[in-house]
Amino acid sequence: MQWFFDMVAAAIYAVIVQNLVFNGGYGITEAVRMASKPKKLFSTAGMIIYFSTVTAVICRILDFLPQIEKQNNTIHFLIFFGVLMIVYFVSGALSLIILRPNKRFMTKLSMCAMNTLVMAIPLINHRSVSTLGESIGTAFGSGVAFVVASVLISVGFTKIAHNKKIPEPFRGTPVMFIYVALLSMAVTGITGTGVFA
């Protein structure tokens, strides 16, 4: 039962205290893109949660093997990236066989699998020497943190888009990045920690 509490605590920590989107910038491009298309947010977030959780679980289990545990960070990254590729190809093949999706779905699947947030989670779990429950919680919580970040950016996006007081050169993308930077500073200031602190 302890693993469940570890998982829940890690998930809450990943959403509230250590939001990797704001604190580390992982997946920020996709979060900004989803802010302008809120109808696609939950399907994208679901895919990110799926890929991050499955990859984190497999990578954490592999970390328990002595041959992999003693390898350096570069080898770990290559192993974790290989695991992500296998998960992506298996998921894509099963999607093609079972769901018969359109090209747009397959493009979204590849964008979610190759998201920097998904690739960062196994390395963060490895560096923090997380238990399996904490790894699952961190992966799931980071996916939920992506939703929180996207919603916050979306709220700001709608307000900023209708603000006529913003000078012409700053409208659009420049003011959006300033807004995201301010949100990131606010989250980091509240938590007082960085990603690898």
Image: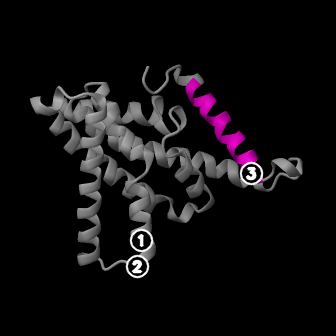
Q: Magenta part of the protein: which range?
A: 172-188
> What kind of residue is marked 1?
Phe
- Check the picture and name the quadrant holding the C terminus: top left
Evaluate if marks 3 and 1 touch, with contact meaning CB atoms under 8 Å apart.
no
> What kind of residue is marked 3?
Lys
Q: Nearer the viewer, mark 2 or mark 3?
A: 2
Q: Which residue is mark 3?
A: 159
Image coordinates of residue 1 in percent, x first then y, are 15, 32
Disc 3 residue crowd, few under 14, some 14–19, many 20+, Cα 10 Å: few
Q: Which residue is mark 2?
A: 102
* Residue 89 in the figure: left or right of residue 171: left
Disc 2 residue crowd, few under 14, some 14–19, many 20+, Cα 10 Å: few
Work out whether residue 84 or residue 121 is closer to the camera in this orientation and state it.
Answer: 84
Image coordinates of residue 142 in percent, x first then y, are 40, 41
Q: Residue visible at 25% across and 56% down? A: 87
Evaluate if marks 2 and 1 touch, with contact meaning CB atoms under 8 Å apart.
yes
